[in-house]
Image (cartoon, helix red, strand yellow):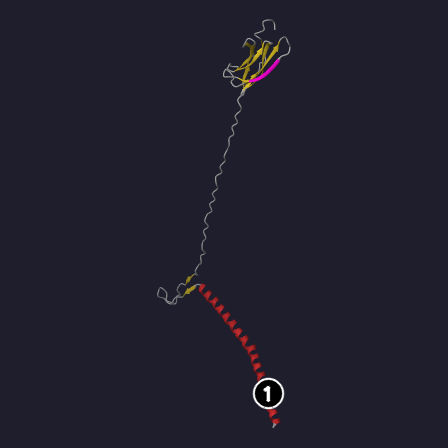
Amino acid sequence: MGRKRRTVQRRWRRARSDRAATLVEYALLVAVLVIPVVEGLSFLQTGARTKMGHVAENVAQSPTTTIGDGSGSDGSGGGATPTSTTAAPTTTAPTTTIAPTTTTQKPTTTTTTTTTTTAPPKPIPATNDAATATAEKTSKSTWSATAATTVTTKDGKPVVGAKVTLEICTRQGNKSSWDCSSQQVTTDDSGVASWTVDDLTKSDTMMQATVTAVLADRYDITVDDSSSTDVSPFCTKKC
């Protein structure tokens, strides 16, 4: 009894194993045969659709021919009517219009600067008179000495505002030396420049006046530096 049971179990196991092998084989067959067939059909379907699309496009673009019904215009049969050919539609490319480009150039403005050079006026010639020396008694024991000169142009017009340097020298007694002093004086409206030395005493016996320099804008002055001499009013004898 136990042997028979074991035999049944072995057969059942073998049959089960054979059934499993058969299922695997069926699955492999399906994978090998069915999948390529499906892929092929899909490829053929795509190719057929593409081909039909090309055919339809060619038919749409081909000329159309109209054939008559065999009856001629003169009543005689058998004559073919003229063929009417309709040309394929012409596609006209759109025209692109390019707007003209306008270039505006700014005008060039040239500014010319004129430089005017004014030459300085020529200096006016002028000169001075020789200095004059004047002695004048101012008290019982004192006296004054005045030196003066006049600056004028060649036309005799006074030179106003000229700076004149006057030198006045005094001498005491019979000495050979002189005591000198210089002053710068401005000419007045008459062109006269003068300078006075006061408080000279009886011991001052002589005075001398000299023009040493004359300066004035716009004038070319020639200086007369001649000296002029005068004696003291207290000098009654030879001094």
Task: Write the residue at 58% across / 83% down.
Answer: 20
**In the depicted structure, whether residue 52 falls above or below residue 6:** above
Which is nearer the eye, 77 or 81? 81
Provide residue 106's location: percent of width, then percent of height.
Answer: 48, 41
Q: Nearer the viewer, residue 75 or 179?
A: 179
**Left or right: 62 as drawn, with respect to 167:** left
The amino acid at mark 1 is Arg
Q: Residue at x 59, y 16 (%)?
A: 182
Residue at the spot 61% in from the left edge and 11% down from the top edge:
171
Residue assigned mark 1: 13
The residue at the far top in this view is 237
* Span of residues in magenta: 179-184
Name the spot of residue 91 as percent of width and height, x first: 44, 58
Q: Is residue 180 visible?
A: yes
Residue 213 visible to the viewer? no
Q: At 62% across and 13% down in the image, what residue appears?
A: 179
**Quarter holding residue 36:** bottom right
Question: Which one is nearer the viewer's eye here, 124 or 109?
Answer: 124
Q: Look at the numbered disc 1 and give the secondary structure of its residue.
A: helix
Q: Where residue 4 sits in the image (x, y, percent)? A: 60, 93
